[in-house]
Image (cartoon, rainbow, N blue to C red):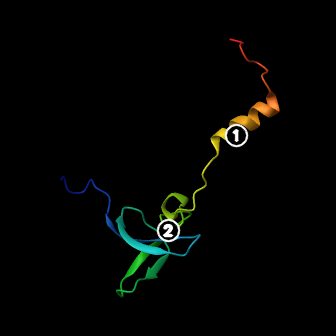
């Protein structure tokens, strides 16, 4: 790797604002806010709106869409209008 052309890659704490969960990882992101971690070191703190701790896909709280019911609801509302027009 060429020296001097890559961004600084350092440990950063990400905090999920909806759950309060925090984790340390390495990133090029920086922040003015800092936090002292349990290992005694101080790291930049970056607040994120959603992470694996709060995302419905990872938590299992995702909604299952009833697509057949949605199609029937659409057909009841709009009927067969426009059928065969092309």
Q: How many marks?
A: 2
Choose between 38 and 28: the one closer to the eye.
38
* Residue beneath the point at 76% across and 18% down: 82
Residue 70 in picture, x, y percent from top left: 70, 40
Residue 76 in picture, x, y percent from top left: 80, 33
Dot 1 corresponds to which residue? Answer: 70
* Residue beneath the point at 64% across and 45% down: 66
- Looking at the rendered structure, the secondary structure element under dot 1 is helix
Residue 20 in picture, x, y percent from top left: 54, 75
In the visual, does 14 lie left or right of 67? left
- Pointer 2 local density, CA inside 10 Å: few below 14, some 14–19, many at least 20: some
* Residue beneath the point at 32% across and 58% down: 7
- The answer to whether 45 is drawn above or below residue 69 in the figure is below
Q: Which mark is residue 85?
A: none
- The answer to whether 45 is drawn above or below residue 81 in the figure is below
Q: Quadrant of residue 18?
A: bottom right
Residue 54 in picture, x, y percent from top left: 54, 66
């Amino acid at each position: 790797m060429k020296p001097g052309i890559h961004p600084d890659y350092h440990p950063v704490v990400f905090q999920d604002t909806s759950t309060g969960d925090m984790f340390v990882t390495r990133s090029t992101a920086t922040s003015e806010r800092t936090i002292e971690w349990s290992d005694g070191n101080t790291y930049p703190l970056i607040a994120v709106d959603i992470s694996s701790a709060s995302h419905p896909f990872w938590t299992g709280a995702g909604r299952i869409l009833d697509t057949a019911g949605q199609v029937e609801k659409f057909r009841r509302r709009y009927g067969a209008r426009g059928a065969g027009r092309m």
